[in-house]
Amino acid sequence: MMLSRLEQICQDLILFPIFHLLLSLICYTDGVGIVSFLQYLDASAFWSLYGLSHHSAFLDTVGVFFAEYAAYVFATVLLIVFFYPSKERAKNKMVVLVSVAAAVIARFGVKAAIVYAYPRPRPFISFTNLQPLISTPLVENFQSFPSGHTIFFFALATVLYCFNKKIGTWALAIAALISIARIYVGVHWPSDILGGVVLGVLTGWAVYRWYRTSRFYV
């Protein structure tokens, strides 16, 4: 009982100042202070990572590979798994189909709905002196949030993790590298990535749960 009380006191001592700070920002700035602070953190994190680019040919090559080409390697591996003859071919096919279905719903359903309501400009639109390492389609200049690559691959990797934790862990790691690289090359804000991770994981989990209760479950 005493230990529990001490733990509660410690939590209060840590959380109360944070809560008080946030409440003060809301009360005295009508929430503008919090928004400005979060935007400052977002921009600071972006420049910290993007600022590493254009200094090392090796790092830039690695960044461009993960930001733009790793997706094709990922897709090739999935195709091999899909068509590879094995005793569990039927199950492997279903794993790939459910994973890709989750990724497509996340990218072309969830992201498309958010972009329609919140057309956020990419970093190189907000900062015209910024030189991204890769190019993006003009129609996507105001489709920064959430990151399409991040939401797609985290949805896909989440489903893979639900089927097989070992393979899923590797998939999540690759999805993370792809996502971080998108900031490094200058085409996404860190908050785009964070939003993509959360929405991708939730979409992947929801699709997997639906699959488990459907007639397609193998």
Image (cartoon, rainbow, N blue to C red):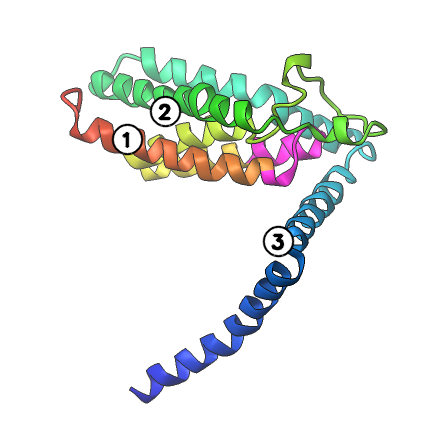
Give the labeled residue for mark 1: 208
| Dominant secondary structure, magenta | helix
- Residue 102's disc number: 2
Rounded to the nearest whole Å, what is the CA distance between mark 1 and mark 2? 8 Å
- Measured from the top left, where is residue 68 in percent x and y? 62, 21
Side (left or right) of 196 relative to 24: left
What amino acid does circle 2 point to?
Ala
Query: Which SS class for mark 1?
Result: helix
Query: Which SS class for mark 2?
Result: helix
Give the labeled residue for mark 3: 31
Residue 218 sits in quarter: top left
- Measured from the top left, where is residue 152 in percent x and y? 47, 25
Range shown magenta = 177-191
* Label 1 environment density (alpha carbons within 10 Å; few <14, some 14–19, many ≥20): many
What amino acid does circle 3 point to?
Gly
Query: Toward the viewer: 155 or 59?
Result: 155
